[in-house]
Image (spheres, grey):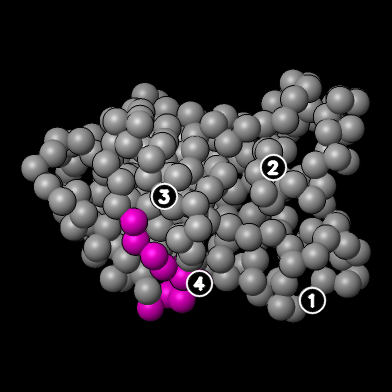
Amino acid sequence: MPKDTQRPAALVTGARRGIGRAIATSLASAGFDIVGTDIAQDGMAETARAVSAAGGRFHVLMADLALLEQHAPLVASAWAAFGGLECLVCNAGVGAMQRGDVLDVSPQSWDRCFAINTRASFFLAQAVARRMVAEGAPQRAARSISFISSANAFLASPDRAEYAASKSATAMVAKIFALRLAEDGIAVHDIRPGVIRTELTAPVAEAYTKRIEAGLSPIRRWGEPDDIGRAVALLASGALPFSTGDAFHIDGGLHIPRL
């Protein structure tokens, strides 16, 4: 794969489907080449085609991000793919193993949510940030790290307590990295999707459709993966250079308190 490109490069986790694919595609449209990683190959070919159609090159790296020993080789390979990284998007995540009463949450489901949604995101961001800081000022584009948290970072959901708790922790991780990396010119963003049409929400689609139609969010429609992808691409482009550590609610106004 040729590396003599002036296009910036982004590493997107959970890139094989849904929000991850939309992020990869939107970043490609914004001028990035994409390194996509996931735990399984299913769907990666479709992501590769979408990125190519958007004008970007795509390189696949498989990894189980819950295994921290895989982070260093992943970052090294991602860095080598296109001669550096200007952007990391920590998107990979899992939901509760089973929605239900908070009194029935299992330690296994709790640990799984935190291992992937929070712990993996923290240490992968740490590994990429170390390399970015060591490399010095960017040559091809602005540098950024985006964490995909959730509206559940601040909205409590007793039927998926472990997921909400892990996403709240991820939102704090974004603030912490923003404080540390500002002096190095690396912006950090917290993206908070609302009710988005993905495989994760498919089992409760009928219930959420009724709630949306009844006014759950002021904008009465489902969010789409592209809504998140466009937000990430805007921030990664450096279009908001005086912003770091901010939470961007991509939720149709779901976050607005109402009386």
Check if mark 4's residue and mark 3's residue have beta carbons within 8 Å: no
Please tell me whether mark 2 or mark 1 is closer to you in this view: 1
Please tell me whether mark 4 or mark 3 is closer to you in this view: 3
Alpha-carbon span between mark 2 and mark 4: 23 Å
Q: Amino acid at mark 1?
A: Ser
Mark 2, residues whose alpha carbon is within 10 Å: few (<14), some, or many (≥20)? many
Q: Say which element carries label 3.
A: helix
Q: Is residue 146 magenta?
A: no
Q: Which residue is mark 3?
A: 45
Q: Position of residue 111 (x, y in %)?
A: 66, 74
Is 258 left, or right, of 31 in this rendering? right
Alpha-carbon span between mark 1 and mark 3: 35 Å
Please tell me whether mark 2 or mark 4 is closer to you in this view: 4
Up/down of 37 relative to 155, above or below: below
Provide the residue span drawn in magenta: 60-69
**Image quadrant in which you'd find residue 236:** top left
Mark 1, residues whose alpha carbon is within 10 Å: few (<14), some, or many (≥20)? some
Which of the labelled discs sits on residue 151, or is there none?
2
Check if mark 1's residue and mark 3's residue have beta carbons within 8 Å: no
